[in-house]
Image: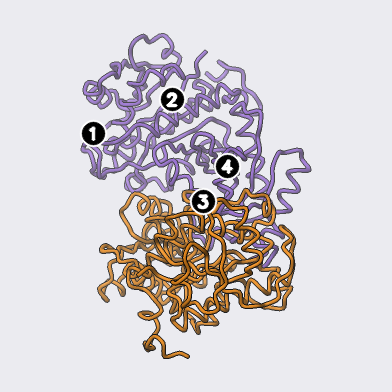
Chain colours: A purple, B orange
């Protein structure tokens, strides 16, 4: 059976709703999953009418109804008041809708009523205007799922990066280069490769300093923190190696030598991934008990409403979420203790 | 007239001599410059005999004789005792030769008897074994030329990166993110683009932190140091901008938006450059009074003697040095005060 994926609409004034109707015009998306849009029925209807190939929406009251919907896009409209769509304009009420739709999607995943969650972009300033204190999707989802040791990751085809830290200054990131965080990241990466059903799961760990420190000449972190973390993971039977020189490890993954790289800070992983896979990158949150992927871009207010936005990253996010579910990762297997399906209401 | 370029042979046990005879088999190299090899005549002779298309060597006593040499490679053999070639083996005497050939090349450039210097790789451990305390080419050349404010740079086609710091730990690199170093790097980059004869010389300055600090949310360096340095350079009439988000600025240069990027630390520039231009990267030392380019790889002892080494980076280094000379950069224009040619002996 195809996985049922909740896809949140994102900020209605951003490009989210536009790329959503474009993505749902692709037959491949429908062959990979059963989509369930969480968002505004009215806005979806208006945009779908102008998107060649996108089926019309149909309102569903429960996610379980999605499978019975034929030649239409099931939309779960939670009834939250939705403002008019004004592309490119910041609106706290649009921010409130965007984040509440995410709350619905997470709840459905935690209740095992959907198999995974894919999110369209929301605007951080918009959600702040609506009174929410979150930095974005990731910390909100982590809170909702009670996750502490989660990781923001960037996947693009066979390139996969798990960052040991994310949105903080580079100076603060240096203090987060700890043996525990590195080892946990290797474990998380290994589990993700397993969740994708891959036979080979080689996790390469990047160094922090130029040339991976060159035996301590350019910094001690490789000797004191990274190498011990790799040794610990090898002892646990994980397939991993490192620390590798940062300026070639991503190329080596690109050429097929590694299946994932653990990056020591945000830009170490973001610079190579955005360079090679600008349009096909997918954000993945690992270390949470549900499958969650996201586009790798923001609301792009500057082009919202112009029809220029491309749906490639969203299509890739949907495909990756479906792969995780088919590789064996669903809330049913990830949530511990397992709750029998149907027991939640 | 074609520029006269001194090309040092590098560590004879590394891949330097092999890529040198391969490079000199290319007609394009000869159309761009008049090469003058500085190194061992005997080793060159042995290798050239096996390199299809490489002209035989001929010994010259003075660089000025090079132009009169026909269908042969002029080799300036300084007479330093050269050990037998043992590919892949570390040898302090080979290290001594490598670095002394560089000394000769730099002296010739400073005396304006050659127009530029291109270096093949030497081995740092080898030169240490021979009793030299340098980290490599760059600090040695800086010392010989009396340069204090030099920069290690990486060029590949229309991608050019000037690093504000190089071989030090990332933690130490953070302390080198100063307004002065950034502004000097922009000036150095601007002069280099001018030296290449380019009409457009847009220097983009990368941020240090994720998203270029996001208005101070992820670090203060953008607001306190980078933006003021850019403002200063704009005031001086330089074509520059920034700080730009680090994870897209290199892609934007790749796509033609910028002509150079000032990078805040070694790997910020090295990761994208090695990813895209692994074989065609050229190391350039800027901020010194001579033209000096180098291959962007080491001695590669693991493949030395096997014939696998590729000459692409050396060909690119020769081409770039020639471009600088033809764009107007020669020791004659760079050395201040200008010394009339011929006055030095």
| Chain of the residue under label 3 | B
In percent of width and height, residue B279 lies at 51, 51
Residues under numbered marks 4 and 1 in contact, where contact means CB atoms less than 8 Å apart: no
Establish if B305 lies above or below A42: below
| Chain of the residue under label 1 | A
Mark 3 surroundings: few (<14), some (14-19) or many (≥20) residues within 10 A: some
From the viewer's perspective, tell me whether residue B202 is left or right of residue B76.
left
Q: Nearer the viewer, mark 4 or mark 3?
A: 3
Disc 2 target residue? A6
- Please name whichever residue, B126 or B321, is drawn nearer the observer in this view of the structure: B321
Mark 1 surroundings: few (<14), some (14-19) or many (≥20) residues within 10 A: few
Asked whether the viewer can see residue A315, the reply is yes
Checking the image for residue A307, the label placed there is 1
Checking the image for residue B94, the label placed there is none
In percent of width and height, residue B18 lies at 61, 57
Disc 3 target residue? B278
Q: Quadrant of the N terminus of chain B?
A: bottom left
Q: Nearer the viewer, mark 1 or mark 3?
A: 3
- Please name whichever residue, A291 or A135, is drawn nearer the observer in this view of the structure: A291
Q: Regarding mark 3 in the picture, which secondary structure is present there?
A: loop
| Chain of the residue under label 2 | A
Establish if B339 lies above or below A166: below
| Disc 2 to disc 1, C-alpha distance | 24 Å
Establish if B213 lies above or below B76: above
């Amino acid at each position: 059976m195809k996985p049922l994926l909740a896809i949140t609409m994102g900020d209605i004034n951003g490009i989210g709703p536009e790329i959503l109707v474009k993505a749902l015009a692709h037959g491949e998306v429908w062959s990979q999953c059963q989509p369930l849009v969480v968002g505004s029925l009215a806005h979806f209807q208006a945009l779908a009418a102008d998107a060649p190939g996108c089926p019309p929406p149909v309102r569903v009251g429960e996610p379980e109804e999605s499978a019975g919907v034929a030649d239409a896009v099931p939309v779960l409209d939670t009834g939250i008041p939705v403002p008019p769509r004004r592309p490119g304009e910041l609106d706290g009420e649009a921010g409130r809708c965007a984040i509440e739709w995410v709350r619905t999607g997470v709840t459905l995943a935690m209740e095992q009523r959907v198999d995974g969650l894919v999110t369209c972009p929301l605007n951080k300033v918009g959600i702040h205007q609506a009174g929410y204190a979150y930095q974005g999707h990731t910390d909100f989802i982590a809170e909702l799922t009670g996750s502490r040791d989660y990781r923001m990751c960037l996947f693009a085809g066979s390139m996969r990066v798990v960052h040991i830290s994310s949105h903080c200054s580079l100076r603060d990131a240096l203090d987060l280069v700890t043996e525990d965080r590195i080892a946990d990241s290797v474990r998380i990466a290994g589990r993700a490769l397993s969740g994708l059903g891959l036979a080979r799961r080689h996790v390469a760990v990047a160094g922090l300093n130029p040339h991976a420190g060159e035996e301590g000449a350019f910094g001690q972190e490789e000797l004191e923190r990274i190498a011990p973390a790799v040794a610990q993971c090898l002892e646990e039977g994980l397939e991993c190696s490192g620390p590798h020189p940062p300026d070639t490890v991503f190329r080596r993954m690109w050429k097929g030598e590694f299946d994932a790289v653990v990056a020591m800070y945000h830009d170490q992983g973001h610079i190579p991934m955005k360079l090679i896979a600008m349009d096909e990158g997918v954000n993945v949150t690992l270390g949470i008990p549900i499958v969650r992927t996201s586009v790798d871009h923001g609301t792009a207010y500057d082009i919202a409403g112009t029809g220029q936005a491309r749906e490639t990253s969203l299509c890739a996010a949907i495909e990756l979420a479906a792969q995780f579910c088919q590789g064996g990762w669903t809330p049913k297997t990830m949530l511990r203790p397992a709750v029998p399906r149907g027991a939640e209401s």
